[in-house]
Image: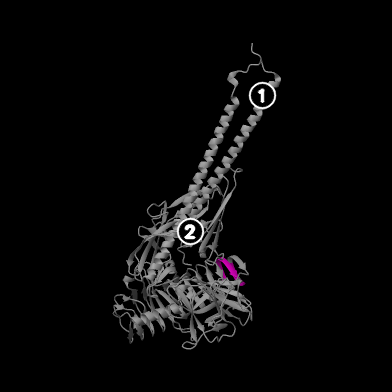
Amino acid sequence: MKIISSENSGQALVLAVIVVGLVLVNTLMVIGGSQLFFQNTTYITQSTQAVNLAEAGVDKALSSLNDTGGAYFEEKETMIGPGSFAVTITSPDPSTKIIEATGYIPSKANPKVKRTVKTTASKGVGVSFNYGVQVGEGGISMSETSRINGSVYSNGSINLSNGAIISGDVYVAGGTEAAADQSSECTLGGNCTDFIFGKNVGGNDRLAVAQSFKPSAQNYLNKISLRLKKTGFPPDIPVRILKDKNGQPDKTKVIASGTLTANLVTDQYGFVEVAFNSPPLLYPDERYWVVLSTTLNPSNYWYWSADSLQGYFNGLGLWSSDWQSGNWTDPNLDFDFMAYMGGEATFIQGGNGSNIGGDAHANTLQNLIITGGAYYQTASNVVAGSMHPGSPDPASKVMPISDSNISDWKNIAASAGTYTGDITSCRPTLGPGKYVGNINIDSNGCTQPIIIQDPVWVTGTLTLKNNVTLRLDPSYGASSGVILVDGVADFDNNIKIQGSGTTGSILMVVSTYDSRVNGISAIKVENGGNSGILYAPFGVVKVENNNRLSELTAWRIELANGVVIDYDTGLASSFFSSGSPGSFSLIKGTYQLK
Amino acid sequence: MTKGLTLLEVLVASGIATVVGIFLVSILVNNSGVFYQQDSIVNSGLGLNDSLRRIDENIRQAATVAGGYPEISPTYTSGPGALVLKLPAINESGIINNVYDYVVIAKDGNNPKILRLQVFPDASYSTRPALNTVLTTILQSIQFDYTDKNGNVVSPNIATSVGVNMTLLSKTGSVGEAQSSSIITSLRNTQQ
């Protein structure tokens, strides 16, 4: 008989127990890790949901402010989706609202996660000056060591000479023909009719509108002008150019897109320009469609002016509830539009020590020293950080203020009162109104700034000489103001055009004088010490002799003799309180996430 | 006198012990492999979640994508591999107009597996705290894409949205798999 020692029995079991123990520990750790990952993922998801709920609260607050004319003060708790949001409103001044919205998951009473978004809304029209200098088809002339500290966007050619310097990037868009290649415009008081879209009309959701046209020649489409007005505060909408398929827009052939900026449209009809990110090449006698699409909103919608007699023979108008559905209806109207073609070569011409500190983008570059990249079709005598031949022409840029905005300001000024007669002496204040005549003020008696309440509309000329200061009323706070001049504006020797004193506020002088006819400057700034924001959509702004300005926007700009433009980045979010009354808009740059 | 085991008995016992041992060890090895794989997945997932959330929140608050930081003679330049954001500076009252802080998200200069988030507040006015923190130490790749509001790819300084595609390595090298995640976030403070 064999005897096995009892001390040696069960050793396999010990090993098995150790292994099972280790396996168990590992398994528990895997489960624990999975639990941790699940909790973390849940928290991240809920955190994102809370931010989205807070942003929904901001949207709700803005909509309610506009629906109630500003009589909206808080939202205690509104349940939506996985959680809720609450809103509080504070008013630092009558035209400004600070919106603080908090999103809660799952509820305000028992939140697992909460996030807060704080932003500011104000009444009026927001205008973005994104460039130190923005110029229309007239282009720019810079000479005698004049300098722009910032970027430049020009729809026309640029001439630099005698040490002129642009420190930032320079864009010159492909040239645009002066007259529209295709257009349809109804006769006011005659065959004009409104076509409403963006709301339900007669049981139909009109959410997309299209107008077809045929270009007369092969060319690039640089921009479209549309005659529009709006009710309420609809959002920006996309504008697409589509090819034709069987007499309707072909949703699969979108050849260009741009954005219609709602701020450029008012409650009165006006042509509003839309430029495209990449101008499409169009062919003669092929049919193309301009398609506008928006969302349904019974309070905030659009009107497109239309010709009820359908006098445009190269196209027709259609509408649909969905631009991608392919179901279009003929309203028997031609919508008012103008199509501007491009294709004209534009250039940046340098010489005598002129240089560009950033990148240069233009069809043709000549005699330039460029620190950054050179982007072009044709170049000669160019020294650059990098060369990019074959680059497409930059697209045209729409001016930051539309004709409709200017008309709106003029209407508000006229409604504030009309004053007839020239003003030739200093006065402590200049209130809002339409001033029929000229304003011509020398320094005599002007020991204090003239306080401006806008909008001021001068039907004649504005001439300021020797140490005159125009200052926006301090009560405007961060809001900005505007002085509109139908004739030419002339500033001579230490003229200051100033905002309210609060950061972000500006006072802008707009001359609507048309220099394209006779070349006479719409705004002329002479001798040193002048400052301000100047805007001439149809005119030449001419600045000479060691002046320093913050921003210029004009059809054409001429700088000479040591002029310096120092772009102020705050101009990208200027806010004019005298826009369409009652409308609150979010002020860009005030979004905070807590 | 104690009798010994026969050779046959020893061989049988050894065979059984070997089979049982191999079986138990294989269980242990496989289980350990599963543990390390799952641990790696969890760590990568946590890293992705936290990193993308922090990047997302900074993009939301940005006024623009800066070309670089500092803007003159930059040490960091916005591009596919790095993101420099320009955020409105803040103080006790809220946003400070025309004053900006900079946030840089980029790989560590010495170790490309480390992704850092750095905050450079305006020295004169901002109360936003300076920061230099590690988002992850197991970065395989990160790609930033810049688009405008129509979805077109544009240069960073005119972008209104930033897409982030991030891949993290497995924690343990050969065990576990790399994991990727992506976000697209719009700049809420952009002027474009």
Identify the residue position indicated by label 2 in the image. B59
Q: Position of residue A188 (x, y in %)?
A: 47, 87
Q: Give the mark nearer the N terminus: 1 vs 2.
A: 1
Quadrant location of the N terminus of chain A in the rendered image: top right
Q: Position of residue B57 (x, y in %)?
A: 46, 56
Q: Position of residue B84 (x, y in %)?
A: 50, 58
The reply to whether the C-beta atoms of the residues labelled 1 and 2 are less than 8 Å apart is no
Taking the magenta stretch, the answer to whether it contains residue A288 is no
Taking the magenta stretch, the answer to whether it contains residue A380 is yes
Q: Residues within 10 Å of mark 1 (few under 14, many from 20)?
A: few
Residue A116, visible in the rendered structure: no
Residue A141 in the figure: left or right of residue A66: right
In the figure, A298 relative to A188: above or below? Answer: above
Q: Secondary structure at mark 2?
A: helix
Identify the residue position indicated by label 1 in the image. B13
Stretch of the chain drawn in magenta: A368-383
State the count of labels: 2
**What type of secondary structure mainly makes up the magenta span?**
strand
Q: Which mark's residue is nearer the viewer, 1 or 2?
A: 1
Q: Nearer the viewer, residue B79 or A296?
A: A296
- Subunit that carries the residue with mark 2: B
Q: Nearer the viewer, residue B125 or A264?
A: A264
Q: Position of residue B188 (x, y in %)?
A: 46, 62
Q: Which residue sits furthest right?
A: B8
Residue A44, visible in the rendered structure: yes
Q: Nearer the viewer, residue B31 or B64?
A: B31
Q: Residues within 10 Å of mark 2 (few under 14, many from 20)?
A: many
